[in-house]
Image: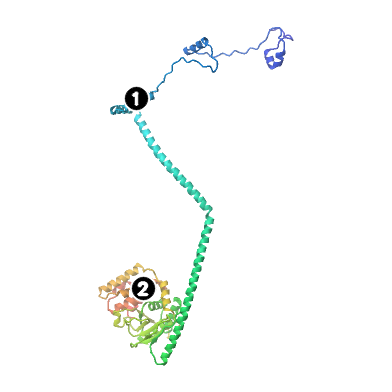
């Protein structure tokens, strides 16, 4: 090993491996070959058992067959049943008898945790059914939700177009309706103009006949109302205040509206003043304020009435009457107690007038005639729908108190008071409080005075009813 290596000697094996072409073409040299021997790996010991020995013996004794060769199988195969299969067959066999069923179930339940397992399996099957039903419902609800979302998206997308279409349709309908109303209004205005022209012509003919009758010494007390104009309630009330104030009476806004409401509601009204002559003066100025035609029939003279025009027609009489008429009777008096036995058959209200501090002036010119139908419509437009419960309670208390004294309030008078309160309460500046004060003073107090009844039931309320208290005191 220590001898030097000859130049022609063979190279070591690892060098030949590094240059295989040189190694293959080199001639086999002379000398001692040198090999690099690696450390031999120690294989783990194999445990020998009977099966390994049998396999080794069979490998030595028998020749290995080629791959894919068909081998003869000399072993015998048989079916091996599992314990569960055996249990199932046994259970099927014993399940035909009731006694064996009980024994099998009892034996099964005697095993540890058997009852809990059976309960768990039964509960799981029921829960599965419930869960399946709930899942189906959830799926249906989800499908409905998705459908609604799609509809909502579609509606949002079509919102502008739908709105435009609806607006166009509404505008078309409104235009058509407006056109129809305009046509109807034009026709109505045409018909009204024709009727107004005919009425104007008839009134001119009537006035011409009246002048001829006067020249021939015809009826002295002739009432023929003029053609009335549609005037606002505020202006008419101001005219009443102006004429009565000029004549020397103290009348505020609520009291002037009170007189207009009585004119529109009642066929005859009593006017209480300081003297009888003052009552006549008040009646004349009230009629002049509304442009009414006026006649005096204080001693029962006959009155001739010619209808038409729609204006106010007033007859100043000394006592109330029961005969129906198309004009308004004003009854001057110096007390609030009704004058005439006709009150028991057809009661009427009494309006109390106070004398003012101003000096009476000459009468003012008569105003333009107002339309009585239009005055009634204007009052109705501003009327109340219902009276407050407190007011109704007071009216019922008054009716019960008078009935207990043998002087029951007539139903017609009660209905007229109720109607008056609805009209005046909605139009007066003082509201229902002022209307109640003036209404009791005009409708209830004259009834109490006429039948000499006791008014003590009104004592708790007199502090808020100044006009009623003043009339009861006789001032």
Q: Label 2: which residue? A: 419
Q: Which residue is mark 1?
A: 90
Locate residue 342 relative to residue 165 in the image: left or right: left
Instruction: Looking at the image, tell me whether mark 2 or mark 1 is earlier in sequence order.
Output: 1
The residue closer to the viewer here, 435 or 26, is: 26
Position of 352 with respect to 195 (left or right) is left
Residue 189, compared with residue 305, is above or below; it is: above
Q: Is residue 312 left or right of residue 460?
A: right
Q: Is residue 361 visible?
A: no
- Which quadrant does the N terminus fall into? top right
Q: How is the image coloured?
A: rainbow
Q: Quadrant of the C terminus?
A: bottom left
Q: Which structural element holds mark 1?
A: helix
Secondary structure of residue under mark 2: helix
Q: Badge 1: few (under 14), some or many (20 or more) residues near its Cα, within 10 Å?
A: few
Position above or below: 13 against 335: above
């Amino acid at each position: 090993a220590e001898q030097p290596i000859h130049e022609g000697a063979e190279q070591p094996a690892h060098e030949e491996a590094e240059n295989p072409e040189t190694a293959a073409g080199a001639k086999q040299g002379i000398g001692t070959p040198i090999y690099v021997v690696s450390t031999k790996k120690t294989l783990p010991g194999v445990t020998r058992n009977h099966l390994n020995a049998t396999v080794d013996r069979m490998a030595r004794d028998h020749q290995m067959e080629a791959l894919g060769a068909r081998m003869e199988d000399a072993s015998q195969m048989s079916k091996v049943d599992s314990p569960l299969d055996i249990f199932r067959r046994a259970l099927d066999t014993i399940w035909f008898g009731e006694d064996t069923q009980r024994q099998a179930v009892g034996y099964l339940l005697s095993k540890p945790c058997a009852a809990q397992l059976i309960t768990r399996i039964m509960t799981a099957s029921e829960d599965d059914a419930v869960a399946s039903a709930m899942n189906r419902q959830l799926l249906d609800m989800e499908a409905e939700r998705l459908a609604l979302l799609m509809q909502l998206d579609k509606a949002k997308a079509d919102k502008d177009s739908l709105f435009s279409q609806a607006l166009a349709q509404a505008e078309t309908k409104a235009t058509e309706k407006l056109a129809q109303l305009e046509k109807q209004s034009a026709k109505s205005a045409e018909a009204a103009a024709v009727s107004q022209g005919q009425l104007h012509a008839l009134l001119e003919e009537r006035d011409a006949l009246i002048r001829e009758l006067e020249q021939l010494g015809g009826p002295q007390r002739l009432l023929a109302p003029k053609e009335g104009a549609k005037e606002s309630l505020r202006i008419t009330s101001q005219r009443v205040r102006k004429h009565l104030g000029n004549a020397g009476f103290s009348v505020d806004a609520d009291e002037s509206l009170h007189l207009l409401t009585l004119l529109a509601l009642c066929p005859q009204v009593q006017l209480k003043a300081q003297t009888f002559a003052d009552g006549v003066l008040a009646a004349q100025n009230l009629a002049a304020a509304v442009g009414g035609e006026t006649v005096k029939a204080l001693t029962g003279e006959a009155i001739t009435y010619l209808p038409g025009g729609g204006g106010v027609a007033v007859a100043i009489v000394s006592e109330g009457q029961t005969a129906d008429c198309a004009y308004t009777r004003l009854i001057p008096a110096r007390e609030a107690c009704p004058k005439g036995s006709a009150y028991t058959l057809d009661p009427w209200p009494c309006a109390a007038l106070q004398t003012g501090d101003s000096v009476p002036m000459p009468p003012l010119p008569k105003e333009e005639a107002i339309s009585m139908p239009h005055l009634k419509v204007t009052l109705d437009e501003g009327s109340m729908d219902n009276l407050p419960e407190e007011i109704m309670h007071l009216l019922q208390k008054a009716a019960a108190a008078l009935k207990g004294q043998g002087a029951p309030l007539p139903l017609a008078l009660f209905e007229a008071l109720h109607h008056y309160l609805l009209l005046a309460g909605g139009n007066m500046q003082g509201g229902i409080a002022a209307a109640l004060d003036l209404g009791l003073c005009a409708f209830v107090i004259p009834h109490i005075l006429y039948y000499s009844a006791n008014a003590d039931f009104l004592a708790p309320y007199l502090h808020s009813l100044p006009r009623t208290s003043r009339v009861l005191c006789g001032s």
